[in-house]
Amino acid sequence: MTESNKIEVEFGIPEHGWLLTNLVHKEFYLELDISDVPLDPMVQLCDALIEISKGIKEPTRVIWHLEPYCYYLQLEKLEAGYKAIILESDEFASSARVTKEISGTFEEIILPFYRGIKKFWSKSFKPPHWGQLDSKRIEQLTELIKKNKEYNKV
């Protein structure tokens, strides 16, 4: 039996600007309680997924701020597949080091983040817990993901 290469990502219920986030890949497990300051990481993730779905090879990096510690998610489009790179740094402004690199297919790398964000935004969160994402951004992302699923034959 082969071990799945698919990333698992789950976003919890935000509380006063903090969001429990779990990312699992094979033996790698990362549990973070991320802040919506200085930028909303869910809006950033949506933007990064839109960018990579439009063909941008290295979209905007997502900041998972723990105040002061930081993790970052960098998605990349490769010649034959995708990569998710998790980086970390001691402070927001300090240099980051690679914690984990995961390469795989559209289904293994991109779709889990899309499904996680789609599930998160299907619930209604209001300040002070979490801000709203413009529904047009999710609609745009959904259309782009559908086109990419057809192209990648998922």
Image (cartoon, rainbow, N blue to C red):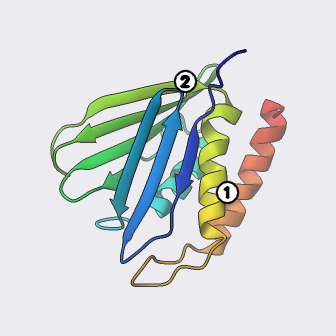
Report if residue 29 is visible in the image. yes
Percent coordinates x, y for residue 109 in the rendering: 60, 35
Give the residue number, with chain letter if any, for mark 2.
Answer: 103
Q: CA distance from mark 2 to mark 1?
A: 22 Å
Q: Amino acid at mark 2?
A: Ser
- Please state if 108 lies on the left or on the right of 126 as rendered: right
Q: Residue furthest top?
A: 1
Q: Residues within 10 Å of mark 1 (few under 14, many from 20)?
A: many
Residue 58: image x %, image y %? 48, 36
Placement of the N terminus among the 4 image quadrants: top right
Ranked by sequence position, the earlier of labels 2 and 1 is 2
Q: Residue furthest bottom?
A: 127
Can residue 54 be spotted in the picture? Answer: no
Residue shown at the point (42%, 64%) measured from the top left = 19
Q: Quadrant of residue 90?
A: top left
Residue 28 lies, in percent from the top left, at 45, 30
Relative side of 112 to 129, left or right: right
The residue carrying mark 1 is 141
**Image point (42%, 79%), residue name:** 129
Q: Is residue 123 above or below residue 59?
A: below
Q: Nearer the viewer, residue 75 or 5?
A: 5
Near-viewer residue (76 or 16):
16
Q: Quadrant of the C terminus?
A: top right
The tag on residue 68 is none
Residue at disc 2, secondary structure: strand
Residue shown at 67% from the left, 43% from the top: 111
What is the residue that sits farthest to the front in this orientation? 1
Left or right relative to 121: residue 27: left
Q: Is residue 12 above or below residue 50?
A: below
Give the residue drawn at x 63%, y 74%. Answer: 123
Neighbor class of circle 2 (other Cα within 10 Å; few <14, some 14-19, many 20+) is many
